Image: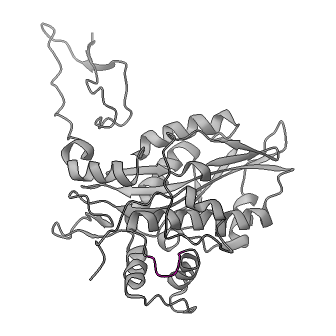
Amino acid sequence: MADTTVEDCKVTDVDECQCQDHCSSARAVPHLSFGPPHTAPSSPPASPSPRKAYPKFSASLNTYFPGAQRESLFWDCCVEALETHGFKDDNTIACIGVCRDEICGTLMDEVKKRFGDLFIFRGLAGFIFCGKTGLKAAHAHSPICNETGREKYLYVVAAHIGVSADGTLGRVDRRGRGGEASYACGALAYFHSMLVKGQVDTRLAMDDIEMSVMSQLLIHNIKWGTVPDMAELTKLASRVIVQSQLEEIIRETVDTRKADYAIIAGVQIHGPGFQQNYFYPMDDLCYGMVEGKRVTLDVGESRPRRSASFVKRQSSHIRPELENYIPSAGPCAAFTD
Protein backbone atom coordinates (compact mmCIF):
# COMPACT_ATOMS: atom_id res chain seq x y z
CA MET A 1 0.00 0.00 0.00
CA ALA A 2 1.35 3.39 -0.91
CA ASP A 3 1.89 6.07 1.67
CA THR A 4 3.01 9.67 1.21
CA THR A 5 5.53 12.13 2.45
CA VAL A 6 4.92 15.86 2.36
CA GLU A 7 7.19 18.31 0.61
CA ASP A 8 6.58 21.98 1.36
CA CYS A 9 7.57 24.86 -0.86
CA LYS A 10 10.14 26.63 1.34
CA VAL A 11 10.33 29.83 -0.69
CA THR A 12 8.69 32.72 1.12
CA ASP A 13 9.61 35.33 -1.49
CA VAL A 14 7.26 34.64 -4.43
CA ASP A 15 9.61 36.58 -6.71
CA GLU A 16 12.21 33.87 -6.13
CA CYS A 17 9.90 30.85 -6.37
CA GLN A 18 10.38 28.79 -9.52
CA CYS A 19 7.34 26.54 -8.95
CA GLN A 20 4.81 26.32 -11.76
CA ASP A 21 2.22 27.52 -9.25
CA HIS A 22 3.67 29.07 -6.12
CA CYS A 23 1.92 27.41 -3.19
CA SER A 24 1.75 27.99 0.52
CA SER A 25 0.19 24.58 1.19
CA ALA A 26 1.89 21.20 1.23
CA ARG A 27 2.16 19.02 -1.84
CA ALA A 28 1.81 15.26 -1.39
CA VAL A 29 4.59 13.19 -2.98
CA PRO A 30 3.53 9.51 -3.37
CA HIS A 31 6.03 6.65 -3.25
CA LEU A 32 5.88 2.87 -2.89
CA SER A 33 6.64 1.54 0.60
CA PHE A 34 8.51 -1.77 0.71
CA GLY A 35 10.28 -1.09 3.98
CA PRO A 36 10.73 1.59 6.60
CA PRO A 37 9.38 5.03 5.68
CA HIS A 38 11.91 7.20 3.95
CA THR A 39 12.09 10.83 2.94
CA ALA A 40 11.55 11.82 -0.67
CA PRO A 41 14.65 13.31 -2.31
CA SER A 42 14.76 17.06 -2.10
CA SER A 43 14.41 19.17 -5.22
CA PRO A 44 17.45 21.07 -6.51
CA PRO A 45 17.68 24.61 -5.16
CA ALA A 46 15.84 27.22 -7.19
CA SER A 47 17.97 29.68 -9.10
CA PRO A 48 18.00 33.17 -7.60
CA SER A 49 15.72 35.79 -9.06
CA PRO A 50 17.31 38.48 -11.27
CA ARG A 51 16.46 41.05 -8.59
CA LYS A 52 18.73 39.25 -6.11
CA ALA A 53 21.38 37.99 -8.52
CA TYR A 54 21.89 41.24 -10.45
CA PRO A 55 21.84 44.30 -8.15
CA LYS A 56 22.44 46.75 -11.02
CA PHE A 57 19.47 45.31 -12.91
CA SER A 58 17.39 45.58 -9.76
CA ALA A 59 18.46 49.20 -9.25
CA SER A 60 17.47 50.13 -12.82
CA LEU A 61 14.15 48.32 -12.49
CA ASN A 62 13.35 50.17 -9.26
CA THR A 63 14.44 53.52 -10.70
CA TYR A 64 12.71 53.42 -14.07
CA PHE A 65 9.86 50.97 -13.43
CA PRO A 66 9.01 51.06 -9.72
CA GLY A 67 6.41 48.49 -8.78
CA ALA A 68 7.06 46.20 -11.75
CA GLN A 69 6.14 42.58 -11.01
CA ARG A 70 6.90 39.20 -12.51
CA GLU A 71 4.44 38.64 -15.35
CA SER A 72 2.75 35.66 -13.71
CA LEU A 73 2.23 37.48 -10.41
CA PHE A 74 0.98 40.58 -12.17
CA TRP A 75 -1.60 38.57 -14.07
CA ASP A 76 -2.80 36.91 -10.89
CA CYS A 77 -3.59 40.43 -9.66
CA CYS A 78 -5.22 41.31 -12.97
CA VAL A 79 -7.56 38.33 -12.89
CA GLU A 80 -8.78 39.31 -9.45
CA ALA A 81 -9.34 42.93 -10.49
CA LEU A 82 -11.07 41.95 -13.74
CA GLU A 83 -13.35 39.38 -12.10
CA THR A 84 -14.50 42.07 -9.67
CA HIS A 85 -16.06 43.81 -12.67
CA GLY A 86 -17.39 40.68 -14.34
CA PHE A 87 -14.59 39.87 -16.81
CA LYS A 88 -13.97 36.10 -16.68
CA ASP A 89 -12.44 33.50 -18.94
CA ASP A 90 -15.83 32.08 -19.97
CA ASN A 91 -17.45 35.38 -20.96
CA THR A 92 -14.56 37.51 -22.29
CA ILE A 93 -12.49 37.54 -25.45
CA ALA A 94 -8.93 38.67 -24.81
CA CYS A 95 -7.21 40.74 -27.51
CA ILE A 96 -3.49 41.35 -27.17
CA GLY A 97 -1.10 43.72 -28.89
CA VAL A 98 2.61 43.21 -28.25
CA CYS A 99 5.75 43.58 -30.33
CA ARG A 100 6.60 41.00 -32.98
CA ASP A 101 9.79 40.07 -31.07
CA GLU A 102 9.98 36.41 -30.11
CA ILE A 103 10.73 37.28 -26.50
CA CYS A 104 7.35 38.98 -26.11
CA GLY A 105 5.47 35.69 -26.33
CA THR A 106 5.56 35.10 -22.58
CA LEU A 107 3.03 37.87 -22.01
CA MET A 108 0.70 36.22 -24.50
CA ASP A 109 1.18 32.91 -22.69
CA GLU A 110 0.19 34.41 -19.33
CA VAL A 111 -2.98 35.94 -20.76
CA LYS A 112 -3.88 32.75 -22.63
CA LYS A 113 -3.54 30.67 -19.44
CA ARG A 114 -6.25 32.80 -17.86
CA PHE A 115 -8.55 33.76 -20.75
CA GLY A 116 -8.09 31.05 -23.37
CA ASP A 117 -7.45 31.59 -27.06
CA LEU A 118 -6.43 35.13 -27.99
CA PHE A 119 -7.19 37.57 -30.79
CA ILE A 120 -3.71 38.82 -31.64
CA PHE A 121 -2.75 42.15 -33.20
CA ARG A 122 1.05 42.19 -32.97
CA GLY A 123 3.06 44.98 -34.57
CA LEU A 124 6.50 46.56 -34.32
CA ALA A 125 7.01 47.91 -30.79
CA GLY A 126 3.46 46.79 -29.92
CA PHE A 127 1.75 49.31 -32.19
CA ILE A 128 -1.63 48.31 -33.61
CA PHE A 129 -2.05 47.90 -37.35
CA CYS A 130 -5.19 45.75 -37.64
CA GLY A 131 -7.40 48.84 -37.52
CA LYS A 132 -11.18 48.94 -37.18
CA THR A 133 -11.60 45.85 -39.34
CA GLY A 134 -9.42 43.80 -37.01
CA LEU A 135 -11.15 44.88 -33.82
CA LYS A 136 -14.59 44.39 -35.36
CA ALA A 137 -13.58 40.83 -36.17
CA ALA A 138 -12.44 40.27 -32.58
CA HIS A 139 -15.71 41.59 -31.22
CA ALA A 140 -17.66 39.28 -33.50
CA HIS A 141 -15.83 36.33 -31.91
CA SER A 142 -16.75 37.27 -28.34
CA PRO A 143 -18.93 35.08 -26.10
CA ILE A 144 -22.40 36.45 -25.39
CA CYS A 145 -23.57 36.39 -21.78
CA ASN A 146 -26.68 34.23 -21.44
CA GLU A 147 -28.09 36.32 -18.59
CA THR A 148 -27.51 39.82 -19.95
CA GLY A 149 -26.84 39.39 -23.66
CA ARG A 150 -23.76 41.60 -23.29
CA GLU A 151 -20.29 40.98 -24.71
CA LYS A 152 -16.99 41.59 -22.90
CA TYR A 153 -13.66 42.52 -24.49
CA LEU A 154 -10.26 42.62 -22.80
CA TYR A 155 -7.49 44.58 -24.54
CA VAL A 156 -3.90 44.02 -23.42
CA VAL A 157 -1.26 46.27 -24.98
CA ALA A 158 2.38 46.86 -24.13
CA ALA A 159 5.56 48.24 -25.58
CA HIS A 160 8.65 46.42 -24.30
CA ILE A 161 12.22 47.02 -23.17
CA GLY A 162 15.21 44.96 -22.10
CA VAL A 163 17.25 45.75 -19.00
CA SER A 164 20.63 44.00 -18.92
CA ALA A 165 22.50 42.56 -15.93
CA ASP A 166 24.53 45.78 -15.63
CA GLY A 167 21.35 47.87 -15.68
CA THR A 168 21.63 49.15 -19.27
CA LEU A 169 18.27 50.08 -20.75
CA GLY A 170 17.30 48.58 -24.09
CA ARG A 171 19.55 45.48 -24.03
CA VAL A 172 18.53 41.85 -23.55
CA ASP A 173 20.01 38.34 -23.61
CA ARG A 174 18.81 36.17 -26.50
CA ARG A 175 19.57 32.49 -26.97
CA GLY A 176 22.35 31.47 -29.33
CA ARG A 177 24.10 34.84 -29.53
CA GLY A 178 27.16 33.86 -27.52
CA GLY A 179 26.30 36.02 -24.53
CA GLU A 180 26.17 39.19 -26.63
CA ALA A 181 23.23 41.36 -25.58
CA SER A 182 20.98 42.63 -28.37
CA TYR A 183 18.42 45.42 -28.56
CA ALA A 184 14.90 45.33 -27.17
CA CYS A 185 12.86 46.94 -28.44
CA GLY A 186 14.87 47.07 -31.68
CA ALA A 187 12.35 49.32 -33.43
CA LEU A 188 12.29 51.82 -30.56
CA ALA A 189 16.09 51.63 -30.28
CA TYR A 190 16.45 52.53 -33.96
CA PHE A 191 13.95 55.38 -33.60
CA HIS A 192 15.89 56.61 -30.57
CA SER A 193 19.19 56.56 -32.47
CA MET A 194 17.65 58.56 -35.33
CA LEU A 195 16.19 61.00 -32.81
CA VAL A 196 19.64 61.54 -31.28
CA LYS A 197 21.02 62.30 -34.76
CA GLY A 198 18.04 64.48 -35.71
CA GLN A 199 17.31 62.21 -38.67
CA VAL A 200 13.85 60.75 -37.97
CA ASP A 201 12.13 60.02 -41.29
CA THR A 202 8.34 60.35 -41.02
CA ARG A 203 7.54 59.71 -44.68
CA LEU A 204 5.25 56.74 -45.27
CA ALA A 205 7.36 53.94 -46.72
CA MET A 206 5.34 51.18 -48.36
CA ASP A 207 8.22 48.74 -47.84
CA ASP A 208 8.48 49.66 -44.14
CA ILE A 209 4.94 50.68 -43.19
CA GLU A 210 4.99 49.76 -39.51
CA MET A 211 8.24 51.57 -38.76
CA SER A 212 7.20 54.71 -40.61
CA VAL A 213 3.75 54.88 -38.95
CA MET A 214 5.31 54.26 -35.53
CA SER A 215 7.80 57.07 -36.17
CA GLN A 216 5.03 59.47 -37.19
CA LEU A 217 2.98 58.77 -34.08
CA LEU A 218 5.93 59.10 -31.72
CA ILE A 219 7.57 62.20 -33.21
CA HIS A 220 4.29 64.12 -33.02
CA ASN A 221 4.36 63.68 -29.24
CA ILE A 222 7.96 64.62 -28.44
CA LYS A 223 8.99 68.23 -27.93
CA TRP A 224 11.27 69.58 -30.61
CA GLY A 225 14.93 69.32 -29.63
CA THR A 226 14.44 66.90 -26.73
CA VAL A 227 15.47 63.25 -26.54
CA PRO A 228 13.79 60.96 -24.00
CA ASP A 229 15.76 58.10 -22.54
CA MET A 230 14.76 54.57 -23.48
CA ALA A 231 12.55 54.09 -20.42
CA GLU A 232 10.65 57.31 -21.14
CA LEU A 233 10.37 56.49 -24.83
CA THR A 234 8.98 53.02 -24.10
CA LYS A 235 6.37 54.41 -21.72
CA LEU A 236 5.46 57.05 -24.28
CA ALA A 237 5.04 54.32 -26.89
CA SER A 238 2.56 52.48 -24.67
CA ARG A 239 0.64 55.69 -24.04
CA VAL A 240 0.49 56.53 -27.75
CA ILE A 241 -0.66 52.99 -28.56
CA VAL A 242 -3.56 53.35 -26.14
CA GLN A 243 -4.57 56.96 -26.67
CA SER A 244 -3.81 57.46 -30.37
CA GLN A 245 -4.69 53.99 -31.63
CA LEU A 246 -6.69 51.71 -29.35
CA GLU A 247 -9.06 54.23 -27.78
CA GLU A 248 -9.73 55.84 -31.15
CA ILE A 249 -10.63 52.47 -32.67
CA ILE A 250 -12.76 51.54 -29.66
CA ARG A 251 -14.81 54.71 -30.11
CA GLU A 252 -15.57 53.63 -33.65
CA THR A 253 -16.26 49.95 -33.01
CA VAL A 254 -17.64 49.37 -29.49
CA ASP A 255 -21.28 49.99 -28.58
CA THR A 256 -21.16 50.39 -24.79
CA ARG A 257 -24.92 49.84 -24.63
CA LYS A 258 -24.26 46.23 -25.62
CA ALA A 259 -20.69 45.53 -24.56
CA ASP A 260 -18.19 46.12 -21.76
CA TYR A 261 -14.44 46.38 -22.19
CA ALA A 262 -11.27 46.60 -20.14
CA ILE A 263 -7.78 47.82 -21.01
CA ILE A 264 -4.57 46.63 -19.37
CA ALA A 265 -1.59 48.64 -20.61
CA GLY A 266 2.00 49.10 -19.58
CA VAL A 267 5.54 47.99 -20.34
CA GLN A 268 6.85 44.45 -20.69
CA ILE A 269 10.39 44.24 -19.26
CA HIS A 270 12.94 41.56 -20.11
CA GLY A 271 15.47 40.91 -17.36
CA PRO A 272 18.84 39.11 -17.42
CA GLY A 273 18.77 35.48 -18.47
CA PHE A 274 15.93 33.88 -20.39
CA GLN A 275 12.20 34.02 -19.70
CA GLN A 276 12.80 36.50 -16.86
CA ASN A 277 10.05 38.96 -17.68
CA TYR A 278 8.29 41.63 -15.68
CA PHE A 279 5.31 43.91 -16.26
CA TYR A 280 5.00 47.56 -15.33
CA PRO A 281 1.36 48.69 -15.43
CA MET A 282 0.60 52.31 -16.27
CA ASP A 283 -2.18 52.84 -13.79
CA ASP A 284 -4.18 55.51 -15.61
CA LEU A 285 -4.24 53.34 -18.74
CA CYS A 286 -5.66 50.32 -16.89
CA TYR A 287 -9.42 50.72 -16.62
CA GLY A 288 -12.75 49.24 -17.61
CA MET A 289 -15.95 50.49 -19.18
CA VAL A 290 -18.83 48.55 -17.63
CA GLU A 291 -22.43 49.31 -18.59
CA GLY A 292 -21.25 52.63 -19.97
CA LYS A 293 -19.40 53.72 -16.83
CA ARG A 294 -15.63 53.92 -16.37
CA VAL A 295 -14.27 51.79 -13.53
CA THR A 296 -10.78 51.64 -12.04
CA LEU A 297 -8.81 48.41 -12.28
CA ASP A 298 -6.56 48.03 -9.26
CA VAL A 299 -3.75 46.05 -10.89
CA GLY A 300 -0.63 47.64 -9.42
CA GLU A 301 0.81 49.78 -6.69
CA SER A 302 0.35 53.52 -6.87
CA ARG A 303 3.62 55.04 -7.99
CA PRO A 304 4.83 58.64 -7.78
CA ARG A 305 4.91 60.42 -11.12
CA ARG A 306 7.33 63.15 -12.15
CA SER A 307 6.94 65.50 -15.05
CA ALA A 308 8.65 64.69 -18.32
CA SER A 309 10.22 67.61 -20.13
CA PHE A 310 10.35 65.89 -23.53
CA VAL A 311 6.60 65.53 -24.05
CA LYS A 312 4.80 68.11 -26.15
CA ARG A 313 2.33 70.01 -24.03
CA GLN A 314 -0.04 70.54 -26.93
CA SER A 315 -0.60 67.59 -29.21
CA SER A 316 -3.32 66.30 -31.47
CA HIS A 317 -2.75 62.80 -30.08
CA ILE A 318 -1.81 63.06 -26.41
CA ARG A 319 -3.75 64.98 -23.80
CA PRO A 320 -1.93 67.92 -22.11
CA GLU A 321 -1.94 66.15 -18.73
CA LEU A 322 0.45 63.52 -20.15
CA GLU A 323 3.33 65.29 -18.42
CA ASN A 324 1.96 64.21 -15.07
CA TYR A 325 2.26 60.53 -15.88
CA ILE A 326 5.72 59.82 -17.28
CA PRO A 327 8.72 60.06 -14.96
CA SER A 328 11.89 61.70 -16.19
CA ALA A 329 14.89 59.69 -15.08
CA GLY A 330 17.76 61.47 -16.77
CA PRO A 331 19.66 60.85 -19.99
CA CYS A 332 20.52 57.41 -21.27
CA ALA A 333 23.48 56.96 -23.60
CA ALA A 334 22.84 53.31 -24.44
CA PHE A 335 22.05 54.07 -28.07
CA THR A 336 24.13 57.16 -28.76
CA ASP A 337 27.17 56.96 -31.01
Query: What colour-coding does the image apply?
Result: one colour
Identify the residue at image location x=41%, y=68%: 101
Give how far across and how far down residue 14 sits, in percent: 34, 33
Give how far across and how far down residue 215 sits, in percent: 52, 81
Viewer-side residue, 210 vs 59: 59
Quarter of the rendering containing residue 319:
bottom right
Label the magenta part by its dominant secondary structure.
loop
Is residue 69 rendered to the left or right of residue 129?
left
How many numbered circles does the render carry? Answer: 0
Q: Is residue 137 visible?
A: no
Is residue 58 rendered to the left or right of residue 236?
left
Q: Is residue 241 visible?
A: yes
Is residue 19 rendered to the left or right of residue 241?
left
Quarter of the rendering containing residue 312:
bottom right
Viewer-side residue, 174 vs 194: 194
Viewer-side residue, 313 vs 325: 313
Quarter of the rendering containing residue 324:
bottom right
Give how far across and how far down residue 163 sits, in percent: 30, 59
Identify the residue at image location x=63%, y=39%: 82
Q: Quadrant of the N terminus?
A: top left
Please say if 274 is above or below 211. Answer: above
Q: Residue furthest right?
A: 257
Identify the residue at image location x=28%, y=24%: 9
Q: Quadrant of the C terminus?
A: bottom left
Please say if 309 is above or below 291. Answer: below
Q: Is residue 184 magenta?
A: no
Identify the residue at image location x=46%, y=50%: 280
Residue bounds of the magenta highlight:
222-226
